[in-house]
Image (tube, rainbow, N blue to C red):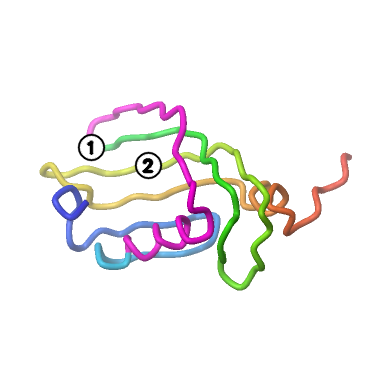
Amino acid sequence: MRSLMAETIAYSDRSRGLELGSFDEFPGWLKQWTTGMSDARVNDPDYLEAGEYSVCRFNGRGTNDGPMGPQATTGKRMDMPFCEILRVQNGRVTSGEIFYDQLTLLTQLGLAEAPLPA
């Protein structure tokens, strides 16, 4: 990963309101996902290239078999869409952001109630 990313990468997890300001913070952010779901997978990636930008739409899947922040492990599965946008300059990722529906994630893991239909 280090060879693909700039040292001063700015990365945003939009759903959680997290801002990462350097490469060194990125592996820790990824580790949070794999600690909470040891079988976490990116499935069916679809890449769209647009100049300096790369957009990837994919399904994230995994079973909550470890801690995810302060929440207790639920043993439930998550399978939902994500979208990640990366900016590549001089052959290295300089910024990125990921979007996903946090309520869907929490509902699938049994940590939130699904909203009632209108």
Q: Position of residue 29 (x, y in %)?
A: 40, 62
Residue displayed at 23% across by 52% down: 94
Q: Position of residue 70 (x, y in %)?
A: 61, 73
73 shown above or below 55: below
Query: Which kind of residue does numbered mark 2 sit on?
Result: Ile
Residue 28 belongs to the span the image colors magenta? yes
- Please give the residue where the numbered disc 2 appears in the rendered image: 85
Residue 93 belongs to the span the image colors magenta? no
Front disc: 2 or 1: 2
User: Start and end of the magenta stretch?
Assistant: 26-52
- Please give the residue where the numbered disc 1 appears in the rendered image: 52
How busy is the neighbourhood of tag 1: few (under 14 within 10 Å), some, or many (20 plus)?
few
Residue displayed at 29% across by 52% down: 95
Q: Of the residues under marks 2 and 1, which one precedes in the sequence?
A: 1
How busy is the neighbourhood of tag 2: few (under 14 within 10 Å), some, or many (20 plus)?
many
Residue displayed at 89% across by 40% down: 118
Apparent side of residue 91 relative to residue 8 in the rendered image (left or right): left
Query: Which kind of residue does numbered mark 1 sit on?
Result: Glu
Apparent side of residue 88 relative to residue 26 in the rendered image (left or right): left
Disc marking residue 104: none
For label 1, the SS is: loop
**Distance in Å between CA atoms under marks 2 and 1:** 10 Å
Q: How many marks?
A: 2
